Image: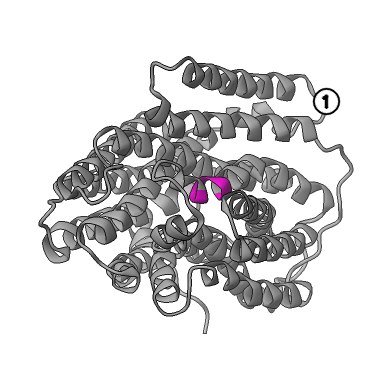
Amino acid sequence: MSAPSPRRWTALALIAMAQFIVIMDTSIIGVALPRIQEDLGFSQENLSWVFNAYVVAFGGLLLLGGRLSDLFGARRLFAAGWLILLAGSLVAGIAPEVWVELTGRAVQGIGAALIAPSALTLLMMLFGRDPKELTKALALYGAAAPAGGTAGVFLGGLITEYLSWPWVFYINIPIALVALLATGPLMPAAQAQRGSIDVTGALTVTAGLGAAVYAIVRAPEIGWDSAQTWLVLAGAVALLAAFVVIQARRREPLVRLSIFHTPNLAAANLTQLLLGGAWIPMWFFLNLYLQQVLGYSAFPSGAALVPMTVLIMIGMIVLAPQIINRFGPKATTITGLALLTAGMGWLSLISPNGTFATDVLPASLVAALGMSLAFIPSLGTAISSARPEEGGLASGIVNTSYQVGSALGLAAMTAVAAANGAGQLGNLPALTNGFSSAFIGAAGIAAVGTLLAALTLRTRTAVHAEPATTRR
């Protein structure tokens, strides 16, 4: 067995930054959405596609990214992902109209779909031989995801207020250049494996996911009783069913379906799916509530969510490993999801005449604590359940679960919000009622996650847990 890399903790910083950036890119546009809507002409119902164009490409291609990581080497895919993300960020920033903006966001998502699974594979290569170090590395990596999502809101507000909305995309360019320069010296090389690429499977699952999100987002505008809505939904189900059939019949599938027979892997991925489906709609509609109802401008709206970021960092790096060590990953996951449910329910009590101190801060902190406790153990369980040679696939699956949940959860809650008045700009009671309905829906998703985690997760320890601190 080779000696541990002396640069592994520096490499971990780059890996964590990668996770921070790909998740930040889902949220950094949140505060900028009203400006983007005004400048490019998005409708209120279609505005969520600035988010979904990224997430559908990201979530739909993560499985392919994981497979490519196993076939061609994680380090190569990590670098390629940064290059594509850089290109997409440039296009999104210079976009003069809606279709160019959505194209740039989709290209960003493709880059992220290569970065995320290869980053997690590189982490396992660097730390997988030592369970104690792996726990520390996973805690820091895990904290980077929701922290990136929430910190993106703050940075988006700062950039939108004092520069302009295109800079929420341009910020990726210097970061990508640094990552490209550092990847070679820091990241371990892995010998490429022989095998084929299931392009048909990747295109089928991406098309199926995109069709499902499109149908749900469009339904409030054209009607749930519309033939178009149900035809597109039927097409989405057919495409996803075809994907399963393709995987079952291919000699070298994108996803070996028997991997889900591995104890806890399917349950942990289901938890991640529902976690994304509850968390992402929360920050999306919380941003809109702060700006469109409470009247916050971009920078104060982003700054209002900094306390969530701080609590998430503390929860994931300090609290979650200690609680996992004492009570196990299952109990910690269930507790986190229950707290997330409570926080969402509390947020649903928002008022048209509310304040940040009473309507937002306490409820958002409860939700943030729940997220921090549920994310780490479910992620660790999903990754540690797979065979080492399928690290890229396992990474792709768990990232896909979270992003698919995010896309479908936001699409569904956008439909719920629109049906309850969220499309009536300037009508504060109607807007508040719509946003409140979305929070109730998100709470329902988290509640289902709590119940399913209790029923499906086994009690074995996924990874050795201890307080996560970096070496000095």
Q: Give coordinates of residue 307: x percent, y percent.
A: 28, 69
Q: What's the residue type where badge 1 is placed?
A: Arg
Crowd class of label 1 (few under 14; some 14 to 19; many from 20; radius 10 Å): few
Q: Give coordinates of residue 116: x percent, y percent.
A: 62, 55
**Secondary structure mainly formed by the magenta segment:** helix
Residue tagged by mark 1? 251
Q: Quadrant of residue 188?
A: bottom right
**In front: 245, or 160?**
160
Q: Is residue 399 above or below residue 209?
A: below
Position of 431 with respect to 230 (left or right) is left
Q: Quadrant of residue 290?
A: bottom left
**In front: 467, or 343?**
343
Q: Is residue 262 visible?
A: no
Tell me the SS state at disc 1.
loop
Q: Identify the magenta region.
A: 50-54
Residue furthest right as drawn: 194
Q: Is residue 201 above or below residue 364?
A: above
**In front: 365, or 233?**
233
Q: Give coordinates of residue 278: x percent, y percent.
A: 36, 43
What is the number of callouts on the image?
1
Visual colour scheme: one colour
Q: Residue at x 20, y 61 (%)?
A: 294
Q: Is residue 111 visible?
A: yes
Q: Give coordinates of residue 232: x percent, y percent.
A: 55, 22
Residue furthest bottom as drawn: 472
State the quadrant of the N terminus: bottom right
Q: Is residue 367 magenta?
A: no
Q: Is residue 71 above or below residue 253?
A: below
Position of 41 with respect to 202 (left or right) is left
